[in-house]
Image (cartoon, rainbow, N blue to C red):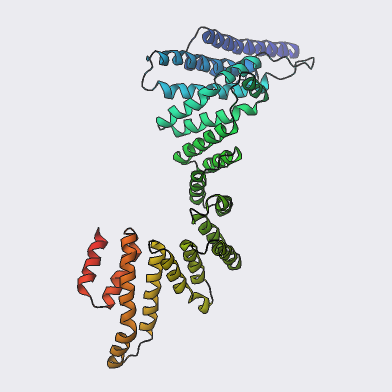
Amino acid sequence: MKKFSLLALAIVSAFSLSAQMSVVKEAERAMKGSKGAGEVIQIMTPAFNNPETQGLAQTWYIPGKASFNEFDHMLGLKQFNKLGADGPQKMGKLLVQGYEYFTKAFPLDSVADAKGKVKPKYSKDMVGTLAGHFSDYSNAGVDLYNAKDYVGAYEAWNIFCALPDNPAVKEALRKNGSLPHDSIFGEIAFNQALAAWQAEKLEEALAAFRKAKNFGYNKKQLYDYAIGVATGLKNQEAILELAEEALPLYGKEDPMYMGQIVNYYLQNKQFDKANSVIDAAIAQEPGNAQYYVIKGVLYENSEDPATKALAKDTYKKAMELDPTNAQAVYNYGRQICEEAYKLSDAAPSRQEEYNVYYTEKIKPLFEQAAGVLEQAYQLDPDNSDVLKFLENVYYNLNDEKMLNDVKKRMTY
């Protein structure tokens, strides 16, 4: 009875393997018969999860090859303007799909047999297929991006950049003269990062921006976008890293990088480091108004009252260097208001004494603040904080006309 059971089990196992192999063979016939990738995959699906067939390179090669075959058929239709509106997007998906199946087939096609010999059966064709469609991945990324399939675009461009990582594919590209310069990979990786950003995959976007940098792509927009992504991730270390790289390249035309660096040290309570960095920048560019704005912010965040008091004159210095610097003008006007508020808090309580004190000390400051803040509003009407200060200023000046004017501006 025991021998009979073992024999029966062997028969059932053989039957199961035979059934699954018939599925693989059927899918192969469909692929060779130019059936669509979807139909081939549907036939092959039972073999994907079966222990007897999921470890065969053939199981994954066939649907991959079917995907590239269908892409090639659609490419022919496209050349004769017979492709439907959704054709380019479908073609891009077929390329990504084909690559994914081939990626699973490659390691299985290099497994040693019982004699310890490796006899790849499909690798040569897969390498040739991928190398032959190399530039198609770049074009597919554009089509998918334009179709707002940002995840698909990211994947297509990711494959374009990753294909040369396969030594055999890289050699094939080199031989046929299709291996581009690193600058091309840098541009594609940058586009890949933008696609990931659009898809709200911020971690992937930041990684792609870094990949673009590694390929030598270092245009200003990369640093600006990458810092934006890092900000969205609240990754302060990445912001610092990017800002420090961008500073020697673009710091003279955009003080934002210096601001990011100083802000990092400010947030981490490293005031000495922050002051050292901005002082060095001012020494190199004493005419840069924005650096004085940043220095003023540092003064304001100091715990030393005497140091805090330096902020007002520093903002004034920035405004004098560049009267069109909205931040400088606003901060200077705000500081004047703060000075007036402090004097108001210290004003005598007796009405007669207060009237004299207000007229001689408080009112001139509010009048000065009004002029500066109005200038700030003209430079940056979108800064709602300017209007809040102006509202308070005109209230303290008992200027009903201008107070109503500010309230109207606040409703727009």
Q: Residue at x 40, y 33 (%)?
A: 148
Image quadrant occupied by the C terminus? bottom left
Image quadrant occupied by the N terminus? top right
Q: In the rendering, at what x and y percent does residue 39 appear?
A: 48, 14
Residue furthest to the left? 401
Q: Nearer the viewer, residue 378 or 214?
A: 378
Above-or-below relation of 274 to 236: below
Q: In the rendering, at what x and y percent does residue 343 appear?
A: 38, 83
Q: In the rendering, at what x and y percent does residue 44 appear?
A: 54, 16
Name the side, left or right, on which 176 lies relative to 250: right
Above-or-below relation of 28 to 215: above
Q: In the rendering, at what x and y percent does residue 261 appear?
A: 55, 58
Above-or-below relation of 194 to 166: below
Above-or-below relation of 396 to 157: below
Q: Nearer the viewer, residue 353 or 220?
A: 220
- Image quadrant where residue 113 sits: top right
Q: State how many labels appear.
A: 0
Q: Residue at x 57, y 52 (%)?
A: 248
Name the side, left or right, on which 158 lies relative to 200: right
Q: Nearer the viewer, residue 93 or 157?
A: 157
- Image quadrant where residue 351 sits: bottom left
